[in-house]
Amino acid sequence: MSRTGQAFLFTIALGNDSSRTARIIFCVLAIVMTVLSMHLMSRHRQAEWTDAHWLEEYETLRFGTSWHGRAWAAKRNQERSPDWPSRFLSRCRGFKVWIGGLAIFGLAALTVLILAIFWPTVLGK
């Protein structure tokens, strides 16, 4: 949903009929959305990691084996998909890929913000 919001903000910030003030405001909002999205993803990752390790400990104590935590991660990372795109992409950790992607949106918003402040003619109007 944050990417939809960012797309909306970029539409306004990069629109030909947007004023300089509007571009600055919407770029700042896009940067805020980026930081909020990265924070939310980090908190979800922290909760997932905590839950997986708690489950691993519980399952090991209760059943003598575990289907979560480090054992599951090791098994998941050993198995490779038969098609090359999945083999290549599965080597990248999802969290790092998404944080990197969100950072790119933030850098794009920062770039447009700098252009809107210092070189507004580059953006038109």
Image: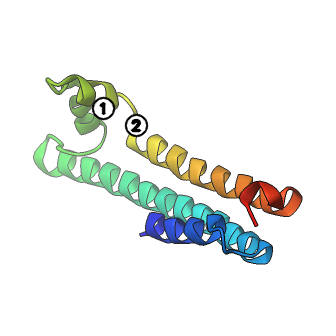
Q: Residue at x 15, y 40 (%)?
A: 65
Q: Nearer the viewer, residue 27 or 96?
A: 27
> Residue 37: x, y in percent?
52, 63
Residue placed under numbered mark 1 in the picture? 90
Q: Amino acid at mark 1?
A: Ser
Q: Secondary structure at mark 2?
A: loop
Residue 23 seen in render: yes
Q: Nearer the viewer, residue 6 or 39?
A: 6
Q: Residues within 10 Å of mark 1 (few under 14, many from 20)?
A: some
Relative to 103, say whether 18 is above or below: below
Q: Is residue 116 left or right of residue 79?
A: right
Residue placed under numbered mark 2 in the picture? 93
Q: Residue at x 18, y 50 (%)?
A: 59
> Residue 32: x, y in percent?
65, 68
Numbered disc total: 2
Relative to 95, say whether 46 is above or below: below
Q: Quadrant of the N terminus?
A: bottom left
